[in-house]
Amino acid sequence: MTWQNHLPTVRGKLLRDEPLGPFTWFRVGGKADVLFLPADPDDLSEFLSQLPMDVPICVLGVGSNVIIRDGGVEGVVIRLAGKAFAEVIVDEDQVIADAGALDSAVAKAAAKAGLAGLEFYAGIPGTIGGALTMNAGCYGRETKDVLASAWGFDRAGEVVAYCLEDFGYTYRHSEVPADIIWMQAVFHGVADDPAAITARMEEITARREASQPIREKTGGSTFKNPEGQSSWKLVDEAGWRGKPFGGAMFSDQHANFIINTGEASASDIEGLGEAVRADVLTKTGVQLDWEIKRIGRI
């Protein structure tokens, strides 16, 4: 008997051998051994407390910055979907956001309440859980600039809480244990005119639409920017902009965005990234590091 046959009882949904490609922006990848859609935080906590500790788990948000490999994902994939994980509340100068809330929804709620500082979230196509994990940011602002605190569950389903200083944030990196499943975050805003905040958000959105292939099957920024350099320039100068690699290529519009041109496999997409990393290293001596998270069996 395998662990899949002895899963804890839940109020949400447990789906075995569930294809994960439809949950990602790239629309590629294999199946989850088990996909868990918890009903609410209590359901998730109880499940974690009863799941054997040797069963791997990972969390999937809206799939905007991830490659699910063709071999699928071992263990349990947890997806925080639905209203129980997506509430955003404004309380005076604080924005309290569930981990499943879209970054853009948090920006809009702050703007409506006249709280400035979170406008940059309008340009990030992920969820707050992902933003906490990787110190997400754009256009000169990062999560560390607005975060006050956050809480979630550890692998055993116990509540853990962190203040900003505990995260040890650096560029696209946190020192918090990788197995924390975030539930909620508190952000600070600064009072400002809602119309002025909205105008800044609209400018960010327009810049993003003009410079990024947001209507393609993509995964956002592929590589982190090396210190003092731009990844897109390194990719472009190495000759990879618009060059096909199986069913994938780096976008003509933005050379740090891989797009699935139609029928790419996950191995096409990851293989293209690895080929570019090797070529750029050979030509320039610069090591490009993945920003996109790659999950699962090759």
Image (cartoon, rainbow, N blue to C red):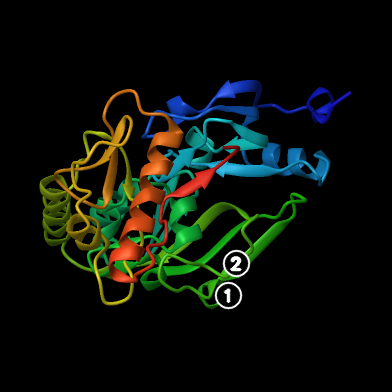
Pick the residue in front: 45 or 133: 133
Give the image location of residue 210, x and y in percent: 10, 47
Q: CA distance from mark 1 to mark 2?
A: 7 Å
SS at circle 2: loop
Report the residue at 30% width, 48% height from top. 104
Q: Position of residue 260 (x, y in %)?
A: 31, 32
Q: Nearer the viewer, residue 278 or 16?
A: 278
Amino acid type at mark 2: Val
Q: Earlier in the sequence, mark 1 or mark 2?
A: 1
Left/right placement of residue 265 relative to residue 210 reads right
Q: Are marks 1 and 2 in contact (CB under 8 Å)?
A: yes
The residue sitting at 68% across, 61% down in the picture is 160
Q: Nearer the viewer, mark 1 or mark 2?
A: 2
On the picture, is 12 further left or further right than 223?
right
Q: Residue at x 42, y 47 (%)?
A: 127
Quarter of the rendering occupied by the N terminus: top right
* Residue that badge 1 annotates: 166
Residue 91 horizontal/vertical position (percent): 41, 60
Q: Please state the horizontal and vertical placement of residue 178, each as a whole percent of the image.
A: 61, 58
Q: Is residue 64 visible?
A: no
Q: Height in image: 47 above or below 293?
A: above
Measuring 28% from the left and 69% from the top, which residue is drawn there? Answer: 284
- Which quarter shows the C terminus? top right
Q: Would you say 94 lies left or right of 165 here?
A: left
Assess disc 2: are there few (<14), some (14-19) or many (≥20) residues with their C-alpha within 10 Å of its C-alpha. some
Q: Nearer the viewer, residue 5 or 42?
A: 5
Q: To which quarter of the image does residue 54 belong?
A: top right
Q: Quadrant of residue 179?
A: bottom right
Judged left or right of residue 186, residue 253 is left
Identify the residue position indicated by label 2 in the image. 176
Disc 1 marks a residue whose amino acid type is: Asp
